[in-house]
């Protein structure tokens, strides 16, 4: 039996400075259900769920978005939205997600209280 899914979890966890959490599913032996944890064995400050699949729906469209962004020299995000739902979901590659998470961690240090930020209120230099 292939253990490629375990290797995928290890690789993705390492991008975030974490390790793969064994038995993450419904195990009560571990804190939380994320597929990753800190190297110290504690709960990480990001919840990561890794799904290893033979095929991914609309992968062609995701790859096209990535290719076009690369040609333009910009980061990329593929957004999916279900008709009738007010929530949308963003997909990007794991390296970009890790960089965004690191930026969020730095921002959180400067803004310890939870708050909603309207990005449209910021100018190009990041000033309100």
Image (cartoon, rainbow, N blue to C red):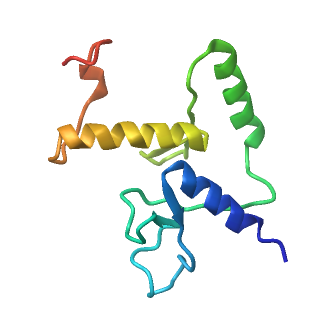
The correct choice, above or below, for 82 with respect to 5 in the image is: above
Q: Position of residue 116 (x, y in %)?
A: 22, 40
Residue at 55% of width from left, 57% of height from top?
13
The correct choice, above or below, for 38 with respect to 80 in the image is: below
Residue at 79% of width from left, 54% of height from top?
55
Q: Position of residue 10 (x, y in %)?
A: 62, 61
Quadrant of the image containing the C terminus:
top left
Residue farthest along the right direction in this orientation: 1
Residue farthest along the left direction in this orientation: 113
Q: Position of residue 16 (x, y in %)?
A: 49, 50
Query: How many numbered dots are placed on residues in this image?
Result: 0
Residue farthest along the bottom direction in this orientation: 28
Residue at 55% of width from left, 46% of height from top?
82
Quadrant of the image containing the N terminus:
bottom right
The correct choice, above or below, for 42 with respect to 126 in the image is: below
Q: Position of residue 118 (x, y in %)?
A: 26, 30
In the picture, measured across the screen, residue 35 lies left or right of residue 46, that is: right
The quadrant holding residue 126 is top left
In the picture, measured across the screen, residue 3 lies left or right of residue 83, that is: right
The quadrant holding residue 92 is top right
Residue at 68% of width from left, 68% of height from top?
6
């Amino acid at each position: 039996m292939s253990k490629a899914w375990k290797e995928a979890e290890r690789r993705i966890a390492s991008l975030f400075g974490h390790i793969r959490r064994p038995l993450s599913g419904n195990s009560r032996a571990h804190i939380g259900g994320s597929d990753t944890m800190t190297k110290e064995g504690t709960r990480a400050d990001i919840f990561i769920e890794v799904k290893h699949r033979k095929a991914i729906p609309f992968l062609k469209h995701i790859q096209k978005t990535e290719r076009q962004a690369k040609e333009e020299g910009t980061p990329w995000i593929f957004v999916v939205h279900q008709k009738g739902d007010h929530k949308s979901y963003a997909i990007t590659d794991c390296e970009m997600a890790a960089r965004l998470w690191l930026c969020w961690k730095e921002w959180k240090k400067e803004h310890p209280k939870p708050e909603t930020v309207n990005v449209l209120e910021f100018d190009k230099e990041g000033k309100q």
